[in-house]
Image (tube, grey):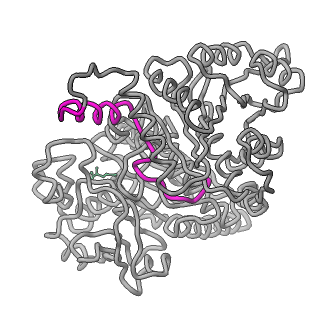
Amino acid sequence: MPKYIFVTGGVVSSVGKGTVAASIGKILVSKGYKVDFLKIDPYVNVDAGTLNPYSHGEVFVTDDGGETDLDLGWYERFLDIPMSKMNNITTGQVYLEVLKRERAGDYLGQCVQVIPHITDEIKRRIKLIGSRRGADIVIVEIGGTAGDIEGLPFYEAARQMKLEESTLFIHVALVIYLKPTAEFKTKALQHSVNELRRIGIQPDIVVARSDRMIDEATRAKIALFSTLPKEAVFCSYDTDVIYEVPLMLERQGIGEYIERLLGLPNLPSHLDEWQQIVNSFRVKNPVVRIAVCGKYTSLTDSYVSIKEALLHAAAYQNVKLEIKWIETSELENNLAMIEQLDTVDGILVPGGFGKRGAEGKLKVIEYARTRRKPFLGICFGMQLAIVEFARNVLNLKDANSTEIDPTTPHPVIYLMPEQEEIIDKGGTMRLGALPIRIKGGTMAHALYGNNIISQRHRHRYEVNPRYWESLQKNGLIISGTSPDGIRIEIIELKEHPYFIATQFHPEFKSRPGKPDPVFLGLIRASIEAAKIKDEESVKRITA
Ligand code: GLN
């Protein structure tokens, strides 16, 4: 029978509950347990696909085409096990299911209520995760903070689970360090523990989230007010490498303590290899600078998988990464901003939707192509690379994507034909992992070292087949397609040190210690570019 660990949050959201949940999973897997996850998002949307990444962070795409919360990305990066759309539930999904059953007459004669009908459906979904892969332990992370109105049915279901299964409650809450008086303030954490108790949940473990390691007096105080022994209080403090959190928590003995509470044997954890990977993220030089040119750049969580994939590739190559975030909608109004690209070694244009910032991205791509700067385009970034090429190489001046300009005379990017009939916006894109055939002798083939790869997708538009021939005649290489050859998946340029773009999203499958090849290629080419630039400046100085 699987055991269930619920991870709740207190004081404020975004304190790193997801990282703590993933880290605990990492420790337990290293001990030999089989772990699965469930992320609960109490909002009413059915999935994250219709949410704005600017306010909610990136939409993480799973192999089976789920558009999910970005915490699933952390689970995958920490544990390297594929998540499914089942691993993320929302209020919307739960109600949709219950209402469907109500209409079908499954509850005839009954008054359908939050307790027991909604809570039963929540418990059913939690237990489904427990049974589907034969997990020993399921880690259930409840989004938001204790006391949120939206979360209440989920907390109630969690409370009831204690009566039915072997469960453990871990509460992660912010502790503030006041610099002027040099003291930790735990009052807000105490209040959030009280809030949990009010709804019937007594945490078994408290993880204090702080900018630095808490002292013994603070630990004792948290324990006392939480009615816990001191050894039940742990600390997750700020670190320069996020992948260190499992090591940090395991150094404090969290794995063994969890085993003890769950009545499991004390198995040794094996995190040596992980420690080495973490060390590789600490290289100080040489530095490689990459510009990420998008439109949600003020919230880096909107590009979290891109950022991590770049970090994985840089660490793998033993270089330090510096990311320059460029907001392309600003660049549109201030073309002089393009000069900022002179200071970087490589350029990445990520995925995106809609018109805002698109012309700025086109300027960036033109710069990368004509100035021979290493370039990686992803999804919308690839589509715009085609638009740029059509405008400036094929001389189709008003070429565009119909997503940006529906009346363009040269729709080089157009709506995929099977999308034309679709009206609903939720979960209807071309989604999830699909095979890609790579052409021999291309850069893509050298990078992936395979004829067939599988990568995740999330798009409605694609390269219009009408233009394939003229694109190719003018030097654009189609290096990857769908296996039936009808859709472009990878493009590259011949006379360029590194210009490659993908219709799929390679960032979702990149892992620490196992970077995705096109990211690795970008970093390698950028290191070369940086070297050449250094040599030139040395020559200039000595001349
Ligand atoms: N907006 C584009 C499309 O729907 C690209 C999507 C993306 O970058 N994920 O095809």
Residue closer to the observer: 59 or 44: 44
Placement of 60 over or under 286, stated as above or below: above
Please state the horizontal and vertical placement of residue 477, each as a whole percent of the image. 32, 77
Task: From the viewer's side, name the closer residue of 141 and 183.
Answer: 141
Q: Quadrant of residue 425?
A: top left
Who's the residue at 49% across and 81% down the image? Answer: 449
Residue 481, located in which quarter of the rendered image?
A: bottom left
Instruction: Decide whether residue 82 is among the magenta residues.
Output: yes
Query: Residue extending furthest front?
Result: 109
Q: Can residue 125 be spotted in the picture?
A: yes
Q: Position of residue 221 (x, y in %)?
A: 83, 18
The answer to whether 413 appears left or right of 73 in the picture is: left
Tell me where residue 499 appears, x and y as whole percent. Answer: 43, 68
Against 306, residue 396 (above or below) is below
Q: Going 82% across and 43% down the picture, which residue do you hit?
A: 253
Task: State whether residue 366 appears in this view.
Answer: no
Camera-nearest residue between 103 and 472: 103
Q: Residue furthest bottom?
A: 441
Q: 232 left or right of 330?
A: right
Magenta-tinted stretch: 78-106
On whether residue 283 falls in the magenta region, the answer is no
Residue found at the far right of this picture = 216
Q: How many marks?
A: 0
Image quarter (top left, top right, bottom left or bottom right) of the C terminus: bottom right
Q: Is residue 303 left or right of residue 276?
A: left
Q: Is residue 133 above or below residue 428?
A: below
* Coordinates of residue 374 in the picture (x, y in percent): 49, 65
| Prevailing secondary structure of the magenta residues | helix
- Residue at the image point whose x is 57% and y is 46% from the top: 138
